[in-house]
Image (spheres, grey):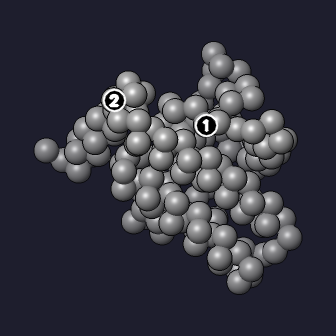
Amino acid sequence: MTTLDQIQERLEGALRSASGADDRELAARLRDEGHRLVLLMNGLVRATRLYSLENQALDAPAQELAEVLAGLLESLGVVHVVFVEDQAYVNDVRLRLRPAEQPIVDQLVADLTAQGVGVSKDAARATTLRARACKLGWQDACGGNSVVD
Protein backbone atom coordinates (compact mmCIF):
# COMPACT_ATOMS: atom_id res chain seq x y z
CA MET A 1 0.00 0.00 0.00
CA THR A 2 1.46 3.35 -1.03
CA THR A 3 1.64 6.42 1.14
CA LEU A 4 -1.07 8.05 -0.98
CA ASP A 5 -3.36 5.06 -0.46
CA GLN A 6 -2.77 5.22 3.28
CA ILE A 7 -3.51 8.96 3.36
CA GLN A 8 -6.70 8.43 1.36
CA GLU A 9 -7.78 5.64 3.69
CA ARG A 10 -7.15 7.81 6.76
CA LEU A 11 -9.00 10.72 5.18
CA GLU A 12 -11.98 8.56 4.21
CA GLY A 13 -12.16 7.15 7.72
CA ALA A 14 -11.86 10.56 9.37
CA LEU A 15 -14.50 12.08 7.10
CA ARG A 16 -16.87 9.17 7.68
CA SER A 17 -16.44 9.64 11.39
CA ALA A 18 -16.83 13.42 11.32
CA SER A 19 -19.69 13.64 8.84
CA GLY A 20 -21.54 10.66 10.29
CA ALA A 21 -21.28 12.16 13.75
CA ASP A 22 -19.77 8.86 14.92
CA ASP A 23 -16.89 10.77 16.36
CA ARG A 24 -18.30 14.05 17.62
CA GLU A 25 -14.99 14.98 19.21
CA LEU A 26 -13.17 14.80 15.87
CA ALA A 27 -15.92 16.80 14.13
CA ALA A 28 -15.81 19.47 16.84
CA ARG A 29 -12.03 19.64 16.70
CA LEU A 30 -12.13 19.86 12.90
CA ARG A 31 -14.62 22.72 13.12
CA ASP A 32 -12.57 24.55 15.75
CA GLU A 33 -9.21 24.07 14.06
CA GLY A 34 -10.67 24.70 10.60
CA HIS A 35 -12.21 27.93 11.89
CA ARG A 36 -8.86 28.91 13.35
CA LEU A 37 -7.10 27.99 10.09
CA VAL A 38 -9.38 30.23 7.99
CA LEU A 39 -8.95 33.19 10.36
CA LEU A 40 -5.17 32.70 10.48
CA MET A 41 -5.07 32.50 6.69
CA ASN A 42 -6.91 35.80 6.51
CA GLY A 43 -4.56 37.43 9.00
CA LEU A 44 -1.47 36.23 7.19
CA VAL A 45 -2.75 37.20 3.75
CA ARG A 46 -3.62 40.67 5.04
CA ALA A 47 -0.24 41.01 6.80
CA THR A 48 1.52 40.33 3.51
CA ARG A 49 0.04 43.60 2.25
CA LEU A 50 1.92 45.47 4.99
CA TYR A 51 5.21 43.59 5.05
CA SER A 52 7.51 41.98 2.53
CA LEU A 53 7.54 38.18 2.65
CA GLU A 54 11.04 38.25 4.17
CA ASN A 55 9.98 40.47 7.08
CA GLN A 56 10.22 38.85 10.50
CA ALA A 57 6.80 40.27 11.41
CA LEU A 58 5.31 37.43 9.37
CA ASP A 59 7.24 34.70 11.18
CA ALA A 60 4.94 34.31 14.20
CA PRO A 61 1.63 34.24 12.29
CA ALA A 62 3.13 31.95 9.63
CA GLN A 63 4.39 29.60 12.36
CA GLU A 64 0.99 29.56 14.07
CA LEU A 65 -0.73 28.81 10.77
CA ALA A 66 1.80 26.05 10.03
CA GLU A 67 1.16 24.47 13.45
CA VAL A 68 -2.63 24.47 12.99
CA LEU A 69 -2.23 23.08 9.49
CA ALA A 70 0.23 20.42 10.63
CA GLY A 71 -2.25 19.30 13.31
CA LEU A 72 -5.05 19.03 10.77
CA LEU A 73 -2.79 17.19 8.34
CA GLU A 74 -1.78 14.74 11.04
CA SER A 75 -5.43 14.00 11.82
CA LEU A 76 -6.79 14.00 8.28
CA GLY A 77 -3.90 13.42 5.89
CA VAL A 78 -5.21 16.08 3.47
CA VAL A 79 -6.76 19.47 4.14
CA HIS A 80 -9.19 21.06 1.67
CA VAL A 81 -10.51 24.56 2.30
CA VAL A 82 -13.55 25.43 0.20
CA PHE A 83 -15.69 28.56 0.17
CA VAL A 84 -19.22 28.25 -1.20
CA GLU A 85 -21.47 31.29 -1.17
CA ASP A 86 -21.26 32.54 2.43
CA GLN A 87 -20.02 29.27 3.92
CA ALA A 88 -16.54 27.92 4.60
CA TYR A 89 -15.73 24.21 4.68
CA VAL A 90 -12.70 22.22 5.70
CA ASN A 91 -12.79 18.72 4.26
CA ASP A 92 -16.56 18.90 3.71
CA VAL A 93 -17.26 19.95 7.29
CA ARG A 94 -19.02 23.31 7.47
CA LEU A 95 -17.37 25.81 9.76
CA ARG A 96 -19.54 27.77 12.14
CA LEU A 97 -18.88 31.40 11.38
CA ARG A 98 -20.27 34.14 13.56
CA PRO A 99 -22.10 36.90 11.68
CA ALA A 100 -19.31 39.34 12.60
CA GLU A 101 -16.77 37.01 10.94
CA GLN A 102 -18.55 36.88 7.57
CA PRO A 103 -16.88 40.07 6.28
CA ILE A 104 -13.50 38.55 7.23
CA VAL A 105 -14.20 35.43 5.16
CA ASP A 106 -15.55 37.53 2.29
CA GLN A 107 -12.35 39.58 2.35
CA LEU A 108 -10.20 36.44 2.38
CA VAL A 109 -12.09 35.09 -0.65
CA ALA A 110 -11.63 38.44 -2.42
CA ASP A 111 -7.91 38.54 -1.58
CA LEU A 112 -7.33 34.97 -2.75
CA THR A 113 -9.32 35.56 -5.92
CA ALA A 114 -7.25 38.67 -6.64
CA GLN A 115 -4.12 36.52 -6.34
CA GLY A 116 -5.41 33.99 -8.84
CA VAL A 117 -6.32 31.35 -6.29
CA GLY A 118 -9.17 29.09 -7.47
CA VAL A 119 -12.18 30.12 -5.45
CA SER A 120 -15.77 29.74 -6.63
CA LYS A 121 -18.73 31.20 -4.80
CA ASP A 122 -21.18 29.23 -6.97
CA ALA A 123 -22.21 25.98 -5.26
CA ALA A 124 -22.59 24.19 -8.60
CA ARG A 125 -19.02 25.06 -9.56
CA ALA A 126 -17.40 25.00 -6.14
CA THR A 127 -13.71 24.30 -6.51
CA THR A 128 -11.02 23.35 -4.09
CA LEU A 129 -8.87 26.17 -2.82
CA ARG A 130 -5.47 26.13 -4.50
CA ALA A 131 -3.22 28.45 -2.57
CA ARG A 132 0.24 29.54 -3.47
CA ALA A 133 1.48 27.81 -0.36
CA CYS A 134 5.17 28.28 -1.00
CA LYS A 135 4.84 32.08 -0.93
CA LEU A 136 3.54 31.96 2.64
CA GLY A 137 5.79 29.17 3.84
CA TRP A 138 2.96 26.66 4.29
CA GLN A 139 4.80 23.92 2.36
CA ASP A 140 7.17 23.47 5.29
CA ALA A 141 4.27 22.28 7.44
CA CYS A 142 3.75 19.19 5.31
CA GLY A 143 7.11 18.16 4.00
CA GLY A 144 7.15 20.19 0.82
CA ASN A 145 3.80 18.94 -0.49
CA SER A 146 1.06 21.33 -1.48
CA VAL A 147 -0.58 22.28 1.78
CA VAL A 148 -3.88 23.74 0.70
CA ASP A 149 -5.14 21.77 -2.25
Q: Is residue 113 visible?
A: no
Q: Which mark is residue 68?
A: none
Residue 16 position within the rendered picture, expressed as x and y whole percent measured from the top left: 34, 29
Q: What residue appears at the point 29 percent right and 35 percent down from the top-left corner?
A: 13
Residue 30 image point, x, y percent: 48, 44
Mark sitting on residue 22: 2
Judged left or right of residue 47, residue 84 is left
Pick the residue in front: 65 or 17: 17
Residue contact between numbered discs 1 and 2, judged by CB atoms under 8 Å: no
Image-based side of 35 in relation to 56, left or right? left
Of tags 1 and 2, which is closer to the observer? 2
Q: Check disc 1 and report the residue beneath it.
A: 95
Displayed quadrant of residue 15: top left
Residue 98: image quadrant is: top right
Q: Distance between the Cα atoms at labels 1 and 2?
A: 18 Å
Viewer-side residue, 33 vs 2:
33
Precedes in sequence: disc 1 or disc 2: 2
Residue 36, image x and y in percent? Answer: 62, 53
